[in-house]
Image (tube, rainbow, N blue to C red):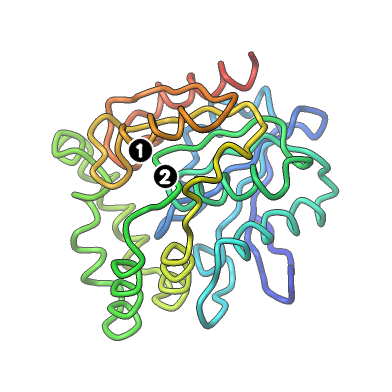
Amino acid sequence: MSVIRLHGNEVSFRVDGEAGRPCLMFSNSLGTNLHMWDAQVECLRRDFHIIRYDARGHGGSATVPGAASLAQLGQDVLALLDALDIERTHFCGLSMGGAIAQWLGMQAPQRLNKLAIANSAPRIGTSQGWQDRAAQVRAAGMDAVADGAAGRWFTPGFIRREPQRVASLVAVLRGASAEGYASCCDALAGADLRGQLHAIAAPTLLLAGAHDPVTTVADAAAMLEQIPRATMVTLEASHISNIEAETGFSLALKEFLQR
């Protein structure tokens, strides 16, 4: 694990795989950290130079007080690439990370090779819903959000089969910075990329969870119609599909990137 200062703020990241391999960057979902990608790194590290980082206010990255924007979250990625002297990369993000991936696809196509957007949408939830959640955690902390997280993230079957893994992820959320979490809720409240997806030129893989109540298969199918060079894979999973369906997710991503 390494820490670097970008825009005056500390950003936590980790590098795996040989530097001479094609670069692949992973972006975490709201309330998680870079370790959510452990299974994918294990599968792909022999073929790629992998960079994963904690979004601002998450994991080991500094909390920046006040509301963030999706553009700022995307610019954090570009600043990290610049600091690491990486000109182009494949990029994979899930949920909030998928929103960042969409922004990069539109605003920084010259920095991308291929794009993977998992369990995301051009508009996730509603602006009022995110504003309410931001206000809730600023006022009362992370417990209420963490208490309901398992059911938002995973199917009941996975929760029964893997109680320790689920508990570990929920513990990360419960221990997260309330202000860091709320700041990214603010970014999602203002993020609306509907009607703009046609501007994504990179070859794009859309990964959807068949049982995802947050960003649905229908959301992914609508994105498939709008992104010119997109393909889609549906996994037997809920919202955090890279963990619930880790093997299928990893193999679909590897096949797409090596195509």
Residue closer to the observer: 245 or 60: 245
Using the rendered view, name the quadrant where residue 101 is placed.
top right
Q: Is residue 174 left or right of residue 93?
A: left
Residue drawn where x is 68% and y is 58% of the image: 2
Q: Quadrant of the N terminus?
A: bottom right
Residue closer to the observer: 15 or 210: 210
Q: Which residue bears the numbered disc 1?
A: 219
Q: Position of residue 207 (x, y in %)?
A: 43, 30
Q: Is residue 60 left or right of residue 163?
A: right
Mark 1 is surrounded, within 10 Å at the Cα level, by few (under 14), some (14 to 19) or many (20 or more) other residues, namely some
Amino acid beneath label 2 = Ala
SS for dot 1: helix
Q: Position of residue 126 (x, y in %)?
A: 32, 61
Which residue is most to the front?
Answer: 195
Using the rendered view, name the quadrant where residue 36 is placed.
top left
Amino acid beneath label 1 = Asp
Residue drawn where x is 36% and y is 35% of the image: 241
SS for dot 2: loop
Q: Is residue 239 left or right of residue 194?
A: left
Q: Please report whichever mark, 2 or 1, sits nearer to the chain's N-terminal start.
A: 2
Q: Do the CB atoms of the residues marked 2 and 1 lie less than 8 Å apart?
A: yes
Residue closer to the observer: 246 or 71: 71
Q: Position of residue 240 (x, y in %)?
A: 35, 42
Which residue is most to the bottom?
Answer: 139
Mark 2 is surrounded, within 10 Å at the Cα level, by few (under 14), some (14 to 19) or many (20 or more) other residues, namely many
Q: Position of residue 28 (x, y in %)?
A: 49, 50
Does 144 sit above or below residue 23? Answer: below
Q: Which residue bears the numbered disc 2?
A: 121
Residue drawn where x is 37% and y is 53% of the image: 124
Does 52 sit above or below residue 130? Answer: above
Residue drawn where x is 39% and y is 40% of the image: 119
Residue closer to the observer: 56 or 203: 203
